[in-house]
Image (tube, rainbow, N blue to C red):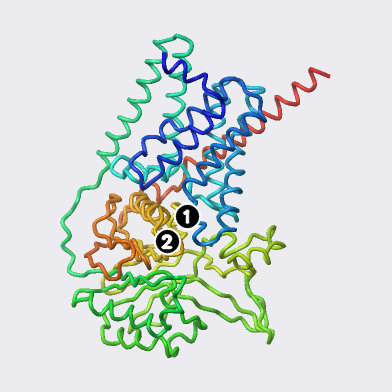
Amino acid sequence: MALNKWTYLHPLTLSLLSGLLLTSAWPNTALTIGLLFAWVPLLLLAHQKAGSFPLLRYVALSLLIWNTGTTWWLWNSTGFGAVAAIVINTTLMCIPWWGFMKMRKYFSESLSLFALVVFWLSFEYIHLNWSISWPWLTLGNGLSAYTQYIQWYEYTGVGGGSLLIWIVNLLVFRSMVSLKEANKKSAWFFSSMAVLFIALLVIISQQLLPAKTELTEKTNVVVVQPNIDPYQKFETLTTADQVNRLVQLSVNAIDSNTVMLIWPETAMSAADWQDNIKSNPYYQPIFQFLAAHPSIQLISGIETFKQYGNTAATKTARKTNDGIYYDAFNAAVNLSANQEPVYYNKSKLVPGVESLPSFLRFMAPVFEQFGGSTGGYGVSDTAVVFRDPIAQLNAAPIICYESIYGEYVTNYVKSGASMLAIMTNDGWWGNTPGHQQHLFYAKLRAIETRRWVARSANTGISAFINPRGEIEQSLAWDKRGAIKMSIPAEQSISFYVQYGDIIFKIAAALTAFFVVVFFYKKSTHARKTN
């Protein structure tokens, strides 16, 4: 009876309830289970046959609460960027619901709800791949707190998690509608289906859980966390001081078995031309350290430039007052005593901060005023693997924001990466849920690729994550130090690495089908009424 009354709650109450459930269930809370019924209040509202515009307003309110409640910490970095991200993302998330409202004019409720799921998955896929990509709130990311139950991500990626959340929500919704209609058998059936579906996936997950092998590697990897406040980076420490801190932390942590050092994003911040870093005076302590330890390769974030002469060699090339074209890069570099520097330039750039799509270039002065980039950074064309001929630990250099792109990360593995090296600086957000969510998403990349993750975060949380998505070692937020671990070189290729976001791609194909059928039905209806 209580559930029956719940279906008649005021639309505003239902809208608020959905938004709060989505927010409270997001990673770094203990309420993840809320995602399995967070959409139900909105689905009940839609079932009441509310008009499209009133319903869309309530949907928008729920999504605004969700976006604000989970990504408010962006404000610590840029107030304008935070407001823009929250408002734009809320608006974009309304599109699948708007499509559902259109569909229900010509389709049954069940078919329209199926279309809603397909549209949402297609939206998430597009949001992973277009120029203003912000997939932080992809539903499948929300299950990252409980990796032991989502080992099947090695087949589906986060798309499987998003689909699971929608299926369970729809089953709970159908159960509640059946209760409202006094159909207890149907309500029991849908409730049982939801429980059985979850139980089946948990069982499958346990079967897929890789065996934990004893680490017998003689070599080890060291991850350094310098804990340098990005807002006071050059006010409290000189460039030389920063380099010396990184080198000293490394010297204190390595031993005779260390083969790899990982420093965080932009750790090497004496911006210079890529051809000049070996002669850069600030970096001499680094090269002296490497010369003294020829078996160690250093992977570090670095700020660099590359000049092209009188030709604009790339779309992102800028021009100096002397007419010389160049690119600026947020990059990673692989350094050792026995090879020339190898670079990878960050390819997944943060919209509005590191890049602007062409259709927003007219707003460049606005973004620059609030901390964004007008010209944008240059990028690498392909994922680059830093190869280690000694220990065969071939590392995928993943820079910050790139670690939330599952299918993109598979490109490194396809190119021979046997481990994932994530370099990030989450200090811009302060001690907020932002850096914790980012860490949790790294666990998903471990499961999808079945690779060890070595994560170096400037202010934390640095960590070693095993292929099961479990954190083996970590260094807490706002701590200075280093962690060390033996990491085996993994060579297997998971189904997800091989085929990528197949669930999203199927959803995109079904979306195209629905759109074609919709316009056919609409035109047929128009002919009949004329």
Question: Callout 1, which amino acid?
Answer: Trp
> What residue is shown at x 43% (from left), y 34% (from top)?
165
Report the residue marked by disc 2. 430
- Inter-mark Cα distance, 1 to 2: 8 Å
Q: Position of residue 407 (x, y in %)?
A: 46, 52
Mark 2 residue crowding within 10 angstroms, few (<14) / some (14–19) / many (20+): some
Give the number of marks: 2
- Secondary structure, mark 2, is loop
Asked which quadrant contains residue 96, the reply is top right
- Say above or below: 481 vs 275: above
Residue 154 in view of the camera: no
> What residue is shown at x 24% (from left), y 56% (from top)?
472
Going from N to C along the chain, the mark reached first, 1 or 2, is: 1
- Say above or below: 523 vs 362: above
Q: Quadrant of the image for the C terminus?
A: top right
Residue 25 in view of the camera: yes
Q: Position of residue 196 (x, y in %)?
A: 33, 25
Comparing 151 with 80, the one in front is 80
Does the CB distance between marks 1 and 2 fall below 8 Å?
yes
Comparing 267 with 342, the one in front is 267
Report the residue marked by disc 1. 73
Could you tell whether 234 is left or right of 359 in the image? left
Q: Position of residue 516 (x, y in %)?
A: 67, 32
Q: Position of residue 414 (x, y in %)?
A: 41, 58
Comparing 148 with 137, the one in front is 137
Question: Callout 2, which amino acid?
Answer: Gly
- Secondary structure, mark 1, is helix
